[in-house]
Amino acid sequence: MKRILLLTTTMLFLPLLLAAGEIWVAPHGDDRADGTREHPLRTPQAALQRAREWRRTADPRVGGGIDLLFEAGIYRLEEPLFIRPEDSGTAASPTRFRSADPARPAVWSGGVELADWTREGELWVAEAPRTQQRPLLTRQLWSADALLPRAQLFEEGTLARMIDFDPENRTITIPRPAVEGLDRAPQLEMLVHQRWAIALLRVRELRYEGDRAVVRFLEPESRLEFTHPWPQPVIGGERGNSSFTLLNARELLDRPGEWWQNYATGRIYYRPAAGERTAPRLTVPRLRRLVTVAGTARRPVQHLRFEGIVFRHAAWDRPIYQGHVTLQGGFPLLDAYKLREKPGFAWDPNLENQAWVERPDAAVEVRFAERIAFDGCRFEQLGATGLDYAAGVRDAAVERCSFRGIGGSAILVGPFGEGASEQHIPYPLTGGEEALCEGIRLVGNDIADATQEDWGAVGIGAGYVRDTEIAGNTVMRVNYSGIAVGWGWTSRDTGMRNNRIVGNTVTDYARQLYDAGGIYTLSNQPGSVIEANVIGLPGPAPYATNDRGFCIYLDAMTDGYTIRGNYCPEARFGTNNPGPAIVWGANGPEIDRQALRARIRRMKEKRQL
């Protein structure tokens, strides 16, 4: 009888014992408060520290987990939130960062709203915020719903063909600009369109020669631009020469809605649109990073969830200080050159170039973590990558999140051999197996208008990954490839395998760059599948120098994929030296698109993706 009574009592109190402890946060809160709903804290940092102390002291409130509940409003972060192994939850007691009211989400912003505008002739002028005891320099300025265009020579998105590209003398020759005075502009930049990437080059000298202008550039980007072989601009391509535009000079501030910043003073100048009579409400990003989740290979961060949080306003300012020349996918080059004598290595006797890259900035970065999830979050108005599962992430998910107005890639997953490793070395030879990402689910996300700043980035990019599911996502309006999986340009075993790209919809991609695919793959990935996707035709890419835009593109030495049941309006499929284990099923316009869309919808409703 006593045993039955004890069991009954335990069952009655079990829900209470497993209830999550709550820590409340509000924009009007106080970090000295007790964190209750009536007396909330003010910052995510204070809430996280409170949760960490609960776990350290084995507070009974952590039995069913810890909910950090954020009331509606904007939380302007003054430093990134740093989450470490001591913040880990458990399977029975996870830590959850949640918007208290999903209909009115909490916004974590790394930006500062510009104030105190004054008029200077036709322009509005504001002082940049100060950071690190100096004016904040920026390449992004956002209105409530859009990235504003920086001052540039042509209409936004419009380019002109260059005349010559001279690696020996490290010059680019262009038609003489119609705007005078650019030879004296101290901050002038050139954007160069080069096959599947762009370069952003700070101008050292612009010299007029009759109806032409010869341009030289600052280091290190001058060396990188003229010595790296892939990708370089093309003179005399299938569809003409490579293209360019000039940006970032006061002399170019001539169209409504454009802006320019004087780096010497920090002052920001904005040309209002017609009828815009009141001072603008614009936001400048202050932080490059909003959140860092960082464990180690032996002590990963575990059991965290972010639900319904909005991540907004992270900066991308790298080109201000060192230009921006990339290898592919938005990864900046550290060094690259063509092998002149005796090309080839033991793992690739035909390799004729070397390259080293670094990882692009990300608003939210996760390293060495397990069972981390972002569910129903929004990533908006971010200068570089939105969310990056960078290394050593396992059994993690990104589900039902939206990505809008992203400067680089919306989502990156897995290492890309960045840092000290040469890009073409098969991954196991670099000793980085513990950094490979596996068991990642990217499901039901909605991506639009990514790659706004770096056209060569992608919607979803996965490097060295295995057992990864990319399913039921929508990707649209990107300038290069929609979904890109794989890295290394090799047929050898790199640890990549069993990757599934299923039930996605990819449209309006390759808007500016080619050598692209709606779905794009690289290297050997045994046991992988591309199935039941709806893929539109690539965009017109009006300045591309070739016609290599495909619905599905199996690039260098892709192998191990089964490709079947994918709808495309035309059978535009491309390959580049594929391996022998590629299996093609039925794909193309003969697939019933409406039935396929209905199937994808049912799978989403049943959470089968």
Image (tube, rainbow, N blue to C red):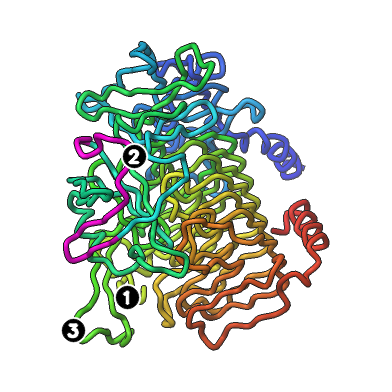
Q: Earlier in the sequence, mark 1 or mark 2?
A: 2
* Residue 537 in which image quadrant: bottom right
User: On the rendered image, what quadrant is the N terminus found in?
Assistant: top right
Q: CA distance from mark 2 to mark 3?
A: 44 Å
CB within 8 Å, label 1 to label 2: no
Task: Name the mark on residue 499.
Answer: none
- Confirm or deny contact between disc 1 and disc 3 (CB under 8 A): no
Asked whether 66 or 277 is in front, the reply is 277
Inspect the image, locate mark 1, and give the three-letter code of the amino acid beneath it. Ile
Asked if the stretch drawn in magenta spans residue 182, the answer is: yes
Q: Nearer the viewer, residue 192 or 532?
A: 192
Q: Residue at the location (51% across, 66% down)?
A: 485
Nearer to the camera, 394 or 571:
571
Which mark sits nearer the N-terminus, 2 or 3? 2
Magenta highlight range: 164-186
Residue at horizontal 31%, vertical 77%? 429
Q: Residue at x 75, y 58 (%)?
A: 600
Could you tell me which residue is drawn at 38 percent across and 63 percent down? 416
Under tag 2, what secondary structure?
Answer: loop
The relative height of residue 605 versus residue 290 in the rendered view (above or below) is: below
Do the CB atoms of the residues marked 2 and 3 lie less than 8 Å apart? no
Find residue 3 and report its horizontal and vertical position in percent: 72, 45
Name the residue type under label 3.
Answer: Glu
Q: Earlier in the sequence, mark 1 or mark 3?
A: 3
Residue 68 placement (x, y as % from top left): 52, 31
Query: What residue does disc 1 label?
Result: 425
Which residue is identified by label 2?
Answer: 178
For the residue labelled by badge 3, is the local secondary structure a helix, a strand or a loop? loop
- Circle number at residue 341: 3
List the single residue furthest toward the front: 210
